[in-house]
Image (cartoon, rainbow, N blue to C red):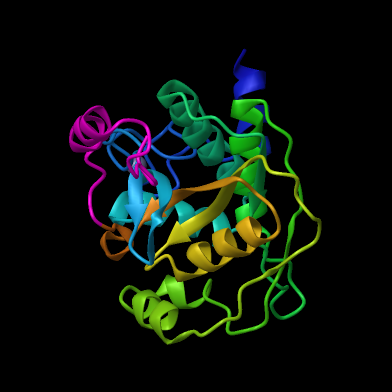
Amino acid sequence: MAILTVLGGFLRPPDCLACGAADAWPCCAICLPPEPFGPGPWRLAADPAVTMWALGLYGDGLRGAVLAGELRGQAAALAALGRRLGALLLAAGIGADLVTWIAARPARGLPRDHARQVASGVAGALDLPLVDLLVPSSGRDLGRARAGRGRADRADLASARPPPRVRHRLLGGRVLLVDDVVTTGRTLAGAAAALRRAGAREVEAAVLGASSTAFGPPVDRSRAAARLARRGPRGDCAGTR
Ligand SMILES: [Zn+2]
């Protein structure tokens, strides 16, 4: 047993990536406490018609774990966090037909496939196919800007990246669009719109960490239900679940 523990230590660091707590890889319960309101649904600030789900607020603990996973090249850590997100979505009863991710161009010759790693964990937990739908759009790389607090928001606001191109024509279907972190949600909103133009019937977004700037107006399910009951099924209930 001791040998297995030692071997396991070689295979992956067993500590919380954010605070170093032992046997808490990839992130301990203190650094990533359960969200009191669950993973969502929320509305995306950049496009309130897009429903957003998140593992947690992009604060100190989760931010530390995500950055450590990305900067130390720990694909397994990002996939493990993605599986946690997927398990929460499963419990919330989210319905989707496939999972895709915000693709990014390689930077300085290194792959930047963090979102794909997160998406692989989400797809695994939901038992959904992972489909490479989006072509990375040109524009400045946001990943490195995220390493500095505050700069991420400005980088996201300042970027005027064209929406990504979709590789395939879609025949309806519900797409779950995954990214590692969302700040204002412009990137997610642009990709969601491109997927809908390509034929997706419904697009929802799921991220590990959401900055406070990413949250749009709250989803008021009780008011939406009351409106639906008053007006009948023709009432506009877009964006509510
Ligand atoms: Zn921790």
Which residue is at a point 26% across and 35% down the rendered structure image?
Answer: 231
Query: Residue 123: percent from the left, percent from the top?
Result: 64, 35
Judged from this view, the residue extending furthest toward the right is 168
Q: Nearer the viewer, residue 184 or 232?
A: 232
Q: Which image quarter is the C terminus in?
A: top left
Which residue is at a point 67% across and 82% down the rendered structure image?
Answer: 138
Q: Report which quarter residue 102 is drawn in.
A: bottom right
Query: Residue 200: percent from the left, percent from the top?
Result: 65, 49
Query: Residue 47: percent from the left, percent from the top?
Result: 40, 63
Q: Is residue 219 magenta?
A: yes
Query: Residue 31: percent from the left, percent from the top?
Result: 31, 43
Q: Is residue 180 left or right of residue 54?
A: right
Q: Report which quarter residue 99 is drawn in.
A: top right
Vertical placement of residue 159 versus 71, above or below:
below
Magenta part of the chain: 217-241
- Answer yes or no: is residue 37 visible: no
Q: Is residue 17 left or right of residue 202?
A: left
Which residue is at a point 38% across and 46% down the rendered structure image?
Answer: 239
Q: Nearer the viewer, residue 91 or 24?
A: 91
Q: Is residue 106 left or right of residue 14?
A: right
Q: Which image quarter is the N terminus in?
A: top right
**Image quadrant of ligand 1?**
top left
- Answer yes or no: is residue 31 visible: yes
Q: Is residue 109 magenta?
A: no
Judged from this view, the residue extending furthest toward the top is 1
Which residue is at a point 35% across and 40% down the rendered structure image?
Answer: 240
